[in-house]
Image (spheres, grey):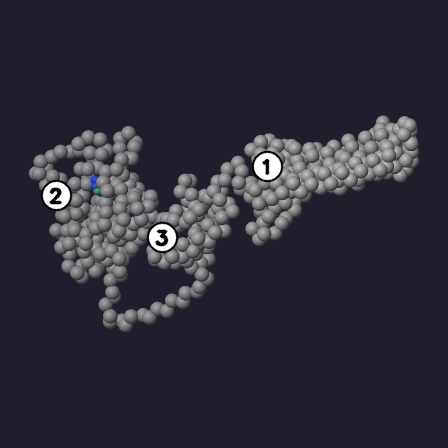
């Protein structure tokens, strides 16, 4: 072809393509890159190739593979730029303009890289055979031998590629997921043929080779469920009752933003340690990214909640107790159980010094919800006065089932039957919430009853009523109904037994 005509076509094409690039750039079209490649690479190489080729004369029909080296170099450059532009066009057509809701939009980068790789391989094969006259069959045979060498050299790279392909099919995570690989936790920002890139909370980028990913245990915090349980631990003082601590821990968790109410937070007593009882709270969250903020809010809330509820978060301390012995003549102060025995109706008639004597022999105890203070059938030589909390009296009936016969609260007592008659415990008593009780032992009771026979009668009346209730429950009937004379008679008999048993 005439050189000047060729030049004219080239110049016109360049001007046209430049205008197109500008117009496409303005609309931010994905095709701008393709046209730019046509203008900068394809058009010039085609021009030079045709120009050199035309210098050889119009009638020359020799195949390219047999032409001179410069021409073949230009032919190669021309094909490389054509393949490059074609790949760009394919990309723009299929993927860049694709909606993210379609399969094209969601195709992983690794997949695109592989398609590109095979297209380039194809282009290279065409150039080798068409331009350089290479025999593809021979090349493939050579590659067979060469691939062993190449395979050894590229062992790691190919390992990454294969692991990447395996990950592509298995899909243990997507971009944007929070994952943990080994000891590294981060958000997946990119997956490619060689590695996965994570961004950590510290804003570092961590590159994990696919082959490493293939061997590690991967934890995904985002998929398939966003639900994640975290188990922060905290210690409270030995003097803080565990059930109360657990209530406070749960309430504080429910009030923390980001902690789910369903499944509900689960506080647990974990261990008895040097300075503290350690608790753990299982908190459920659905936003793993916000975990540090959620834990911060929860831990801060706990400090205030502990203070409001009189709980102590201990730190390593050594408490030195210094006891000063009271002078020999000072009468001992009655111990303060926090429970006043005078509030108990049957002890009402007792004088202050008698009450003090009783209290002095007694001990205060705390029980948690669900604990059993006495068990039906056991021997017992103590009675219990309730200071705070409630208890249920349970009796096993004839069919072997436990049945609630009474509920007792502050100011009431139980356990007196075994104490006064020496019989086994007639029922089981279980704390229905946290309780404070005062335990009065038989020797203290005996001393008081010796002086106060009327008190023994009052208690015997209570015992009589309770026994009636018990028989009713055991037999699941109405109990031994009787007239007042009957009851009087039974109380007398009971009183006799009590006095005989206690020797008063
Ligand atoms: P005791 O038999 O020593 O141990 C179980 C206790 O349960 C018993 O003493 C009573 O104090 C109490 N109890 C048994 N039956 C009743 C009842 N019907 N009402 C209230 N308390 C009861």
What label sits on residue 172 in the rendered view?
A: 1
Mark nearer the N terminus (1 vs 2):
1
Nearer the viewer's eye, disc 1 or disc 2? 1
- Percent x, y for residue 86? 73, 34
Badge 1: few (under 14), some or many (20 or more) residues near its Cα, within 10 Å? Answer: some
Residue 398, image quadrant: top left
- Percent x, y for residue 503? 19, 50
- Percent x, y for residue 387? 25, 52
Is residue 471 in view?
A: yes
Element type at marker 2? helix
Mark nearer the N terminus (2 vs 3):
3
Specify the quadrant that holds the N terminus: top right
From the viewer's side, name the closer residue of 476 and 139. 139
The residue carrying mark 2 is 492
From the viewer's side, name the closer residue of 378 and 81. 81
Q: Residue at x 16, y 41 (%)?
A: 464
Element type at marker 1? loop
Whether 484 is drawn above or below 457: the answer is: above
Badge 2: few (under 14), some or many (20 or more) residues near its Cα, within 10 Å? Answer: some
Mark 1–mark 2 Cα distance, whole angstroms, equals 81 Å
The residue carrying mark 3 is 241
Residue 266, image quadrant: top left
Mark 3–mark 1 Cα distance, whole angstroms, equals 45 Å
Callout 3: CB less than 8 Å from ligand 1: no
* Left or right position of 199 against 79: left
State yes or no: discs 3 and 1 in contact (Cβ < 8 Å). no
Nearer the viewer's eye, disc 2 or disc 3? 3
Nearer the viewer's eye, disc 3 or disc 1? 1
Badge 3: few (under 14), some or many (20 or more) residues near its Cα, within 10 Å? Answer: some
Mark nearer the N terminus (3 vs 1):
1
Q: Residue at x 46, y 57 (%)?
A: 274
Mark 2–mark 3 Cα distance, whole angstroms, equals 43 Å
């Amino acid at each position: 072809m005439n050189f000047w005509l060729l030049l004219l076509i080239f110049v016109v094409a360049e001007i046209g393509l430049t205008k197109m690039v500008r117009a496409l750039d303005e609309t931010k079209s994905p095709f701008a890159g393709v046209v730019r490649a046509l203008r900068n690479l394809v058009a010039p190489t085609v021009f030079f190739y045709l120009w050199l080729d035309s210098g050889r004369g119009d009638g020359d029909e020799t195949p390219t593979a047999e032409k001179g080296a410069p021409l073949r170099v230009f032919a190669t450059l021309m094909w490389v730029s054509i393949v490059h532009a074609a790949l760009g066009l394919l990309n723009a057509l299929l993927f860049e303009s694709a909606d993210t809701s379609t399969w094209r939009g969601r195709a992983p980068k690794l997949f695109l890289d592989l398609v590109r790789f095979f297209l380039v391989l194809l282009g290279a094969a065409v150039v080798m055979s068409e331009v350089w006259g290479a025999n593809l069959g021979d090349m493939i045979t050579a590659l067979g031998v060469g691939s062993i060498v190449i395979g050894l050299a590229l062992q790691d790279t190919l390992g990454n590629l294969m692991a990447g392909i395996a990950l592509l099919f298995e899909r243990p995570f997507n971009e944007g997921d929070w994952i943990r690989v080994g000891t590294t936790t981060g958000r997946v920002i990119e997956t490619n043929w060689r590695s996965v890139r994570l961004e950590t909370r510290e804003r570092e980028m961590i590159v994990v080779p696919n082959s490493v990913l293939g061997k590690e245990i991967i934890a995904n915090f985002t998929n398939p469920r966003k639900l994640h349980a975290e188990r922060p631990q905290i210690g409270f003082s030995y003097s803080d009752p565990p059930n109360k601590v657990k209530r406070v821990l749960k309430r504080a968790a429910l009030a923390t933003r980001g902690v789910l109410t369903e499944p509900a937070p689960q506080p647990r007593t974990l261990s008895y340690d040097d300075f503290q009882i350690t608790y753990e709270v299982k908190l459920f969250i659905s936003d793993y990214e916000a975990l540090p903020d959620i834990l911060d809010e929860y831990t801060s809330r706990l400090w205030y909640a502990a203070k409001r509820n009189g709980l102590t978060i201990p730190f390593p301390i050594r408490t030195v107790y210094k006891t000063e012995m009271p002078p020999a003549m000072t009468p001992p102060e009655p111990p303060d159980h926090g429970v006043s025995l005078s509030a108990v109706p049957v002890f009402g008639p007792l004088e202050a010094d008698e009450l003090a004597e009783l209290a002095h022999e007694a001990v205060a105890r705390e029980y948690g919800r669900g604990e059993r203070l006495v068990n039906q059938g056991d021997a017992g030589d103590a009675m219990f006065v309730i200071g705070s909390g409630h208890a249920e009296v349970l009796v096993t009936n004839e069919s072997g089932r436990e049945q609630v016969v009474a509920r007792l609260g502050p100011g009431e007592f139980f356990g007196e039957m075994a104490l006064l008659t020496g019989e086994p415990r007639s029922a089981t008593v279980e704390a229905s919430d946290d309780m404070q009780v005062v335990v009065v032992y038989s020797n203290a009771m005996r001393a008081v009853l010796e002086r106060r026979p009327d008190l023994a009668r009052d208690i015997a009346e209570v015992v009589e009523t309770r026994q009636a209730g018990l028989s009713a429950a055991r037999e699941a009937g109405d109990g031994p109904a009787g007239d007042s004379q009957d009851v009087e008679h039974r109380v007398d008999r009971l009183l006799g037994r009590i006095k005989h048993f206690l020797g008063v």
